[in-house]
Image (cartoon, coloured by chain):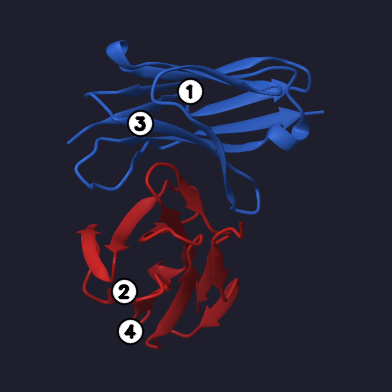
Amino acid sequence: KAGVTQTPRYLIKTRGQQVTLSCSPISGHRSVSWYQQTPGQGLQFLFEYFSETQRNKGNFPGRFSGRQFSNSRSEMNVSTLELGDSALYLCASRGSAEQYFGPGTRLTVT
Amino acid sequence: GIQVEQSPPDLILQEGANSTLRCNFSDSVNNLQWFHQNPWGQLINLFYIPSGTKQNGRLSATTVATERYSLLYISSSQTTDSGVYFCAVDIGGNTPLVFGKGTRLSVIA
């Protein structure tokens, strides 16, 4: 079975721009979660989608949004980028039990 | 909400040494996972262990759900074991996993 994939793997953006990150979950998994990890920090939960509906949401401003498509692929969008948005963004998919992570997208905002 | 605490926060080992990482949680959980984040940022699944003991090579894990803790044992550590170890608990009800802050392990040759 293919694992969780994320694109792009690296991204450099300028303050004020917007960015869209993509995640393809493991086949058959309907839950996709997104996390932000800044240098030296733990995992901050952004949101979770299940069957195209946002099921859980973390404590992030409205500039962070996401969606899930009928094939369970998910995208997250960050608008009006700030320097503090520079981070590793991790996507995870989950079936009935274990959660598995993708390799992450490393976003740098200059 | 549930609190997940990991100890120690940092650990430095000589190659070949053994170590024990601890994860305490403040309430009942349905499941518990251990992950290893390598220096490139990838989180690797180590164990899915709601209770009991599991072993995988040099690594083993024990969860005592009634006492609300889990332990991860690393024997004969290698430099490739370096990274951050996270535990995460599932409290059910379609809620997201709750992660501890991690234990940063550095294994020195």
Q: Chain of mark 2?
A: A
Q: Which residue is under mark 2?
A: A66
Residue A77, quarter of picture: bottom left
Mark carried by residue A80? 4
Residue nearest the observer in this picture, B85 or A83: B85
Taking A95 as reference, is B12 above or below it?
above
* Front: mark 3 or 4: 3
Residue nearest the observer in this picture, A102 or B51: B51
Residue at image x 61%, y 56%?
Answer: A1
Q: Which residue is under mark 1?
A: B8
Answer with left or right where residue B74 lies relative to residue B70.
right
The lab-note entry on whether marks 3 and 4 share a chain reads: no
Q: Please report contact status of discs 2 and 4: CB closer than 8 Å, yes or no.
A: no
Secondary structure at numbered mark 1: loop
Q: Chain of mark 3?
A: B
Q: Amino acid at mark 4?
A: Thr
Q: Position of residue A93 (x, y in %)?
A: 43, 56
Q: Position of residue A7 (x, y in %)?
A: 56, 74
Taking B20 as reference, is B39 above or below it?
below
Farthest residue to the front: give it.
A28
Q: Position of residue A87 (x, y in %)?
A: 47, 64
Q: Which residue is under mark 3?
A: B31
Q: Distance between the Cα atoms at labels 3 and 4?
A: 38 Å
Colour displayed for chain B in the image of the structure: blue
Residue at image x 71%, y 29%?
Answer: B107
Q: Amino acid at mark 3?
A: Asn
